[in-house]
Amino acid sequence: MRDGLIDCARIGKAPELFAGFSAHELEAILSFFDFRAHSMQMPPGAAANGARWRSWLFVGGRGAGKTRAGAEWVRGMAGGFVDFADMPVARIALIGETWADARDVMVEGVSGILAAHGKWDRPQWEASRRRLTWRNGAIAQVFSAEDPESLRGPQFDAAWCDEVAKWRHAQEVWDMLQFGLRLGEWPRAMVTTTPRPLALLKKLMADPANAVTRASMRANAENLAPGFLRAIEERYGGTRLGRQEIDGAIVEERADALWSREMIERARIAGAPPLARIVVAVDPPAAAHKRADKCGIVAAGLDADGLVYVLSDATLAAARPAEWAARAVALYHDLQADALVVEVNQGGDMVASVIAQADSSVPVTKVRATRGKYLRAAPVALLYEQNRVRHVGAFPELEDEMCSLGPDGLLNGASPDRLDALVWAITHLALDGKRATPRVRRL
């Protein structure tokens, strides 16, 4: 509202809906979150199986509106508002990473509980007692996740848990809270967090008894400073940090993987220098049907000093041979590459024939796998360790495979098609000793 007027376009309501109300009445109406909330910030309905969810996880990027959603959920629960609770709840737990975080963000913050209330229904905040008290008698107690034992004894109808992915004793705190969530007809918790590959968080998100909401920073762009989102995406878009903090994605990494996120971030640059040689590597799918693996298509180049630059990941979902061949040939021409490096274990001469049908002028270098994927990838990973490979930009899906490949394959059991293509490209350029005479060119 501006000077007693409602920005109806912003909240999606017709102006005539509010005709006849005074400025004070309009302010009171708009204090209800339903009028200005994004749909993702409202509590979900029942779970798919018809049962009431036990926990609602709001997992999102920084600035996605998680804190405000949590604060409004607490307000709605304490007040017994429609869409939040059937009746006011009596006892609520507020758990932050530390006591200071709970106070400064969850309670007193610009998007916190006090800010979510109007002057007429704001609860009394007693910082010394670490509790909020509403006029109807509802009480919210503040706890620190640094002290799991503080949750031993109290009991609650509801709990708001903020930034669980940062809790030092996450599992212990969560376990203690579960024993205390035992009041009312539907005891439940809301979790708001920017994700990390935390075992507890992944387990909660996979539990069908829980409801999960995902949101990126972009979803709340209208409430961010002008130009902020564009600037932050230009700097961090596609990187590990950007995917976690902007997109709200859980970025996996396994301890026994050949690559680490830190290794890849260290290799990232904005642009490539003049390159002596460029190849497009293709790892064809074993079959051409909807359930087939992807066709890995990755381009890389080599400079005069022997450094490798990963230029493009054009991997194609399950497609007919003519489709992936056309994609690979197009990338070859776009980059003015020297050759297509193609694995021929699946299809042999047929693979080269399909490419020839797309463009018979494209030189094809056939390669054949004689070792397992992990063993083939190890020498390439060593080049990264030696700081001899660069990523020109970000390749999120390719980098996920790199950080997920262990001796037993990818964590999800899928085929590392992108990674196979990457390994073939870099092996051809830097490891097999068959490089052609350099011809320097700029991209």
Image (spheres, rainbow, N blue to C red):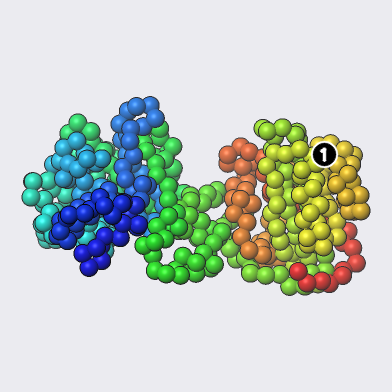
Total marks shown come to 1
Horizontal side of residue 349 vs 386, given as left or right: right
Examine the image and state in which quarter residue 87 appears: top left
Screen quadrant of the N terminus:
bottom left
Q: Secondary structure at mark 1?
A: loop
Look at 52% across and 49% down and name the residue there: 252
Of residues 416 and 289, the one nearer the viewer is: 289
Examine the image and state in which quarter residue 337 appears: bottom right
Of residues 28 and 106, the one nearer the viewer is: 28
Q: Is residue 379 visible?
A: no
Vertical relation: 148 (above or below) 308: above
User: In the rendering, at what x and y percent does residue 105 appear?
Assistant: 27, 60
Horizontal side of residue 315 vs 353, given as left or right: left
Q: Is residue 220 visible?
A: yes
Look at 72% across and 39% down and name the residue there: 319
Q: Amino acid at mark 1?
A: Asn
Vertical relation: 215 (above or below) 186: below
Look at 40% across and 35% down and name the residue there: 207
Horizontal side of residue 331 vs 398, given as left or right: right
User: In the rendering, at what x and y percent does residue 360 appear?
Assistant: 91, 49
Vertical relation: 387 (above or below) 147: below
User: In the rendering, at what x and y percent does residue 317 appear?
Assistant: 68, 42
Q: Residues within 10 Å of mark 1 (few under 14, many from 20)?
A: some
Reading the image, the residue beneath label 1 is 345
User: In the rendering, at what x and y percent does residue 150 appear?
Assistant: 20, 48
Horizontal side of residue 276 vs 244, given as left or right: right
Look at 19% across and 58% down and name the residue there: 27
Screen quadrant of the C terminus:
bottom right
